[in-house]
């Protein structure tokens, strides 16, 4: 079970840092990171991979702080703005996502570490989605409108909460990225138009 594994990873004695390659990608600049694109062979190999858990030691280092800052700069980049982003989209195969909380005042971005959905309620609804990693392509995807999530917060504490509406949709889209799934794999009907990606 991912959550149990996430808690074990927070215990002393576990590997407490990103790999050399992850550190290289994260430290490659200061601003927005390069977004990996579906259709590019090397990028696609990463996008289709399963991400590894984050451990508590990673959260205390400068590398995580840099990754967090640069992921936010990437998803907020006016040239290619989104409402969510997952670490694999910037070449870091770790279970980290950032989601814009449209269900909270000020619509802040929040980070979720080792996230998982532990319950759903209500019905699925089809809604229009795009993706920073799949430019100029949009389509309808069925997603749960209310989910219960379990994750580790940025203080290394386990959390659970209910998320509903558009924020729940974003969460599901980003969580898919951690398992190598892109929204185009779930398309009900594809269309073209411009909306924010994730």
Image (tube, rainbow, N blue to C red):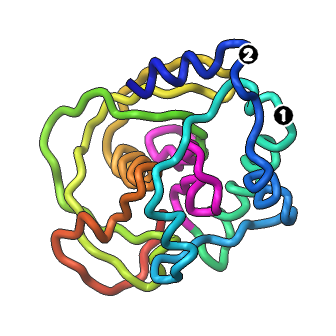
Q: SS class of the residue under badge 2?
A: loop
> Total of numbered circles in the picture?
2
The image quarter in which residue 186 lies:
bottom left
Residue tagged 2: 13
| Image vertical order of residue 128 relative to residue 51, above or below | below
For the residue pair 57 and 146, the one nearer the viewer reads as 57
Q: Residue at x 86, y 65 (%)?
A: 29
Q: Position of residue 128 (x, y in %)?
A: 29, 68
Q: Residue at x 38, y 54 (%)?
A: 173
Q: In this view of the protein, can residue 176 be seen by the observer?
A: yes
Q: Position of residue 64 (x, y in %)?
A: 76, 41
Q: Residue at x 69, y 72 (%)?
A: 34
Q: Residue at x 40, y 71 (%)?
A: 130
Q: SS class of the residue under badge 1?
A: loop
For the residue pair 189 and 22, the one nearer the viewer reads as 22
Image side of residue 12 versus residue 3, left or right: right
- Tell which residue pokes out farthest to the top in this image: 12
For the residue pair 24 and 77, the one nearer the viewer reads as 24
Quarter of the image where the N terminus is located:
top left
- Magenta stretch, residue numbers: 82-105
Residue tagged 1: 61
């Amino acid at each position: 079970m991912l959550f149990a594994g996430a808690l074990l990873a927070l215990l002393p004695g576990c590997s407490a840092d990103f790999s050399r390659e992850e550190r290289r990608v994260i430290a490659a600049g200061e601003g927005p990171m390069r977004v990996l694109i579906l259709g590019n062979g090397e990028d696609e190999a990463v996008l289709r991979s399963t991400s590894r858990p984050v451990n508590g030691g990673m959260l205390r280092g400068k590398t995580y702080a840099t990754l967090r800052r640069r992921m936010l700069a990437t998803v907020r980049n006016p040239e290619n703005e989104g409402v969510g982003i997952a670490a694999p989209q910037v070449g870091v195969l770790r279970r980290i996502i950032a989601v814009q909380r449209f269900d909270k005042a000020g619509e802040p971005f929040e980070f979720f570490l080792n996230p998982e959905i532990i319950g759903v309620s209500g019905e699925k609804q089809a809604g229009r989605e795009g993706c920073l990693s799949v430019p100029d392509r949009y389509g309808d995807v069925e997603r749960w409108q209310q989910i219960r999530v379990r994750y580790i917060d940025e203080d290394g504490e386990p959390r659970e909460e209910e998320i509903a509406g558009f924020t729940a949709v974003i969460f599901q889209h980003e969580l898919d990225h951690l398992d190598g799934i892109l929204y185009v794999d779930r398309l009900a009907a594809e269309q073209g138009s411009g909306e924010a990606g994730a």
